[in-house]
Image (cartoon, rainbow, N blue to C red):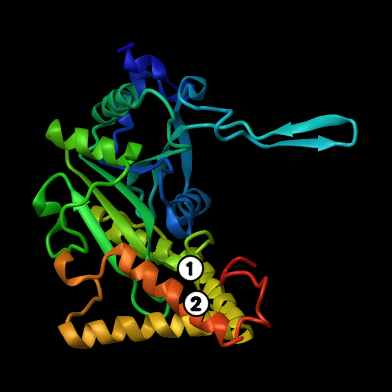
Amino acid sequence: MQEPTELFQFENDASPATLQDMHASVLVVALGGFIDAGHTQRLLADHILDTHESRVVASFDVDQLLDYRGRRPMMVFDRDHWSSYDDPSLLLHRVIDREGVPFLLLVGPEPDYQWARMVEATTTLIKTFGVNLTVSVHGIPMAVPHTRPLGVTAHGTNPRLVTGNDPAFGTVQVPASFSSLLEYRLGEAGHDAIGFAIHVPHYLGQTEFADAAVIGLERLRTATGLAIDVTALAATAGLNRAEITRQMEESDEITAVVRALEQQYDTFLEGRQQRSLLATDLSDLPTADEIGAEFEAFLKDVADDGSTDDTEGRDAPGDR
């Protein structure tokens, strides 16, 4: 492996000589990943940077980490010339919460290459800045309605970090993400790390669903004790819900889908007498294939009844 510390450089005002005065106990990792339903992680990270004092203390060499042809950056062509380029960046910010407590936020695209080396580089920064807890938040799509409380799957490197958690899954095999690998390696090295996967209604997975980001931010605040302002994000979530409601009122098809999911949710709660649809053993839940098959069958019935004729081509809730 090449030297991990050569992947990043400190900014001018964060030289090694001044790092002892820049310690932060928490690192929030927001590097995208395989799945981020509802753009949960991006909304949370953008909100933190937009509403709190921050500055960049280190930057990574993205030319070594990204596949530009796999996800091409955007450029703007203006009549007869190129006028701008969306230069990708992977940055470590030092953020100050509402009570003056510093924490770190690692933001940027998930690395395509050199995961092992990137893990080592991030671990070096964790040690350098005195971080004792690393946290990640993202969204996962679930067959649940947006009109019911959102579930959360918590995971961590130590059971004491996830006390009171009601697992939605047993043992499953899933594609890796950089954040999950980082959490795994930190656990092997004896560092505390915790993650929160917010359950986003699957029909809102491709849109911005700010309610999920609000839930994620609340979990982040509880886990770390950081005083992170949620006001602006909560306001965005309210506008988001209003738009979804408006689109439901305009579409019988969308309303029928949500009502069916509500009935499934409520029936499951009543039968299990659980406070959450997902607070049960995996063996009690239908499989993803079963849920998908039932959902497809429902949509087919709706189409056969002719109820989709006046809604064809409408956007999903939140797309507008």
Identify the residue shown where x is 47% and y is 19%. 64
Disc 1 marks a residue whose amino acid type is Tyr
Label 2 CA crowd tier, 10 Å (few <14, some 14–19, many 20+): some
**Residue that carries the numbered disc 1 in the rendered image:** 203
Work out which quarter of the rendered image holds the C terminus and state it. bottom right
Quadrant assignment, res 186? top left
Q: How many marks?
A: 2
Q: Residue at x 24, y 39 (%)?
A: 183
From the image, state whether disc 1 or disc 2 is nearer to you.
2
Name the residue at 27% across, 50% down.
Answer: 195
Q: Nearer the viewer, residue 164 or 290?
A: 290
Q: Is residue 164 above or below residue 76?
A: below
Task: Tell me the number on the disc at residue 299.
Answer: 2
Q: Residue at x 56, y 80 (%)?
A: 303
Q: Amino acid at mark 2?
A: Leu
Image location (x, y in percent) of residue 17: 34, 18
Residue 205 placement (x, y as % from top left): 47, 61
Q: Nearer the viewer, residue 231 or 276?
A: 276
